[in-house]
Image (cartoon, rainbow, N blue to C red):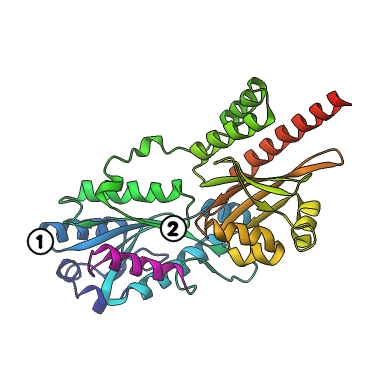
Amino acid sequence: MYSIEELEKYDYFKELLKINKIEYLLDSLTGLVQRQYIIDFIAELIKDKKEFTMAILDLDFFKQINDNYGHDVGDIVIKSVAESLKTYLGDLGIAGRYGGDEFIFLYFGSSDYANLHEFYNGLYHGSIVLRRIIKTSTVSPFITGTIGSASFPKDADNYTDLFKMSDKTLYRGKQKGRNCFIIYVKEKHQNLDVSNIRPIDLFELSITLKNIFDSKESLKTKIMQSSEFLIKNLRVTKMLFIDSKTDRIFDVTGDKLLGFLNKETDKKLLKILDKDQIFITGVNNDITRVAPSLGDITAKNSLKSLLMIRIDIFDTSYGAIMFAETREHRIWESQHKAILVSLARLIAETYYIEENKKG
């Protein structure tokens, strides 16, 4: 919780505290500045032409924490993140609770891109604020968050535009898979249309995949066109395919042979796929541990996060299909898993039908 001494460093809060108790200015759960006062403070800084960077932090999938563990656990998470964020900012900034699981915080250091990158990077590493386990008496959820930010006056000269830019970059971060920060860069983000950033429509994606498989003749064409469609709509970097008959690993995106799966050294991966049909990793070392040959291939191609589904039907396995991402901490959502399962099923059914035609 912010103290009077901490807030009185800023003229805006010093004046408010002359006529208000500090409790009136702070959010009751987190002890951060209430939404209205952090917004008014931003407006005051802009009016006084003081340079700063504004960031919006949104916790990833927080609703699932409330739904699965209850609001008491959710409150503990919110409070813990708030406390660690306040500590991390120290004298370099101030934080407010925007509402629910969203925070606004201001940074008064240099708005130089390299400096901001280093500053935000610190939020995510060393289990300081994000990418950490928060222990409660009953459960220990792993917490990540997405951040979007823009600077005054470098990026915008008024609050409305500054907020829009921060909001745009926040949604860009969500679009890229969450668990990351995006710093506004005019050349990259000025024409970003957030209206196109919408939740994944599983029904729409599934129907399109079905239509691709129904309209194309060769299995190779079916897989390649499905890959192009999903990469565009789910915004992943690559799709890889393992053919169990030849143990070849293909980059479906570029129609390129990347190498071979070694059944002797990659036994752990095969056991995981036999048992669970799915393998998820966000750390390249994990890939290497369970499948050295696949680990080598992903390392050579700068791929650090995989979501892999086995392609099988009845008692027959035809290999595996996977999304691959260059970001180590890409969060694979349930929608990604569901659509990849649908694709694997379509591939397996096509294999099965073709084999029975030959038989």
User: Going 45% across and 69% down the picture, which residue do you hit?
Assistant: 129
What amino acid type is highlighted by mark number 1? Asp
What stretch of residues is rendered in magenta?
106-125
Determine which of the numbered discs, if any, sits on residue 191 in the image. Answer: none
The answer to whether residue 110 is seen in the rendering is yes
Q: Label 1: which residue?
A: 48
User: In the image, 331: left or right of 250?
Assistant: left
- Residue 262: name its quadrant: bottom right
Instruction: State the image coordinates of residue 292 (x, y, percent, origin top left).
Output: 68, 64
User: Going 19% across and 57% down the picture, which residue do you hit?
Assistant: 152
> Is-magenta flag for residue 230?
no
Disc 2: CA contacts within 10 A as few (<14), some (14-19) or many (>=20): many
Image quarter hosting the N terminus: bottom left
Instruction: State the image coordinates of residue 106 (x, y, percent, origin top left).
Output: 27, 64
Q: Is mark 2 on a helix, strand or loop?
A: loop
User: In the image, 350: left or right of 48?
Assistant: right
User: Going 80% across and 52% down the picture, which residue do you hit?
Assistant: 274
- Residue 211: name its quadrant: top right
Examine the residues drawn in magenta and state their main secondary structure.
Answer: helix
Earlier-in-chain disc, 1 versus 2: 1
Disc 1: CA contacts within 10 A as few (<14), some (14-19) or many (>=20): few
Image quarter hosting the C terminus: top right
Instruction: State the image coordinates of residue 94 (x, y, percent, origin top left).
Output: 29, 68
Q: Is mark 1 on a helix, strand or loop?
A: loop
> Is-magenta flag for residue 121?
yes
- Residue 88: name its quadrant: bottom left
User: In the image, 307: left or right of 158?
Assistant: right
> Which residue is at the far bottom?
5
Q: Label 2: which residue?
A: 180
What amino acid type is highlighted by mark number 2? Cys
